Amino acid sequence: MFEQRKKTWNYSWVGIIGVVIIIIAIVQIFKVNPPDRAGGAAQLKPSWTEGKVFDGSAEVPAGGYLPHRLDLNRRATFKGFFTTGRNDRRVAGTLIKAEDFNMWKLGEDVDPMLSTGPVPRGTINRVLESGSYLFLIDNRGGEVPVTLAVLDVGVE
């Protein structure tokens, strides 16, 4: 490729073209596969709700609520069951779209996907399209904390 004669370099066209092609190939490799940047924004892989969301007992504070987020990437069946274990303790189960949550917190009128109303025991079974939802156990009207003996929420 390169020849040295009498301490001077003679370049051949084939050698020059070969070096240019190698440089272009290296530049293209770095353009297609850039090195990882430390401190750059990490890409978050979306997390989809699947299976059991919550199973067990829970306490809903007086004048408060207990939210459970559902992120669906496909049509799915939402099933929920809750019971307070006592007839004098009542909570409402409400399913709303995630974008309506701030309005719901402020007490504005929100069209819920479904709502049980204040009951001591509730069962929910609803087919939902893909999107983001919140299932809320609502005790905002209650004056005492409510312990849910059973709270079973899931997506199939």
Image (cartoon, rainbow, N blue to C red):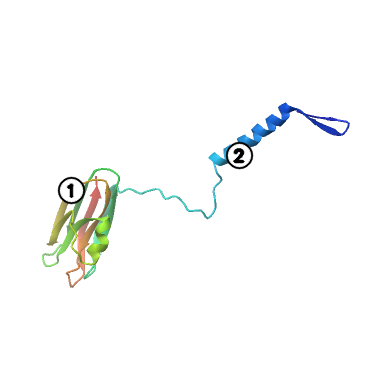
Q: Given this view, does label 1 or label 2 mark the residue nearer the observer?
A: 2
Q: Left or right: where does residue 6 sit relative to residue 82?
A: right
* Marker disc for residue 27: 2
Residue at 56% in and 45% down: 35
Residue type, numbered disc 1: Arg
Is residue 84 among the parts visible in the rendering?
Answer: no
Give the x, y percent position of residue 53: 28, 52
Furthest residue toward right: 6
Please name the residue that numbered disc 1 is placed on.
126
Residue type, numbered disc 2: Val
- Establish if 89 lies above or below 32: below
Number of residues whose C-alpha sits closer than 10 Å to that of mark 2, classed few (under 14), some (14–19) or many (20 or more): few
Specify which label sits upstream in the sequence, 1 or 2. 2
Q: Left or right: where does residue 20 sit relative to residue 134?
A: right
Q: Left or right: where does residue 28 sit relative to residue 156?
A: right
Q: SS of the residue at dot 1?
A: strand
Give the x, y percent position of residue 21: 65, 32
Give the x, y percent position of residue 12: 76, 27
Q: CA distance from mark 1 to mark 2?
A: 54 Å
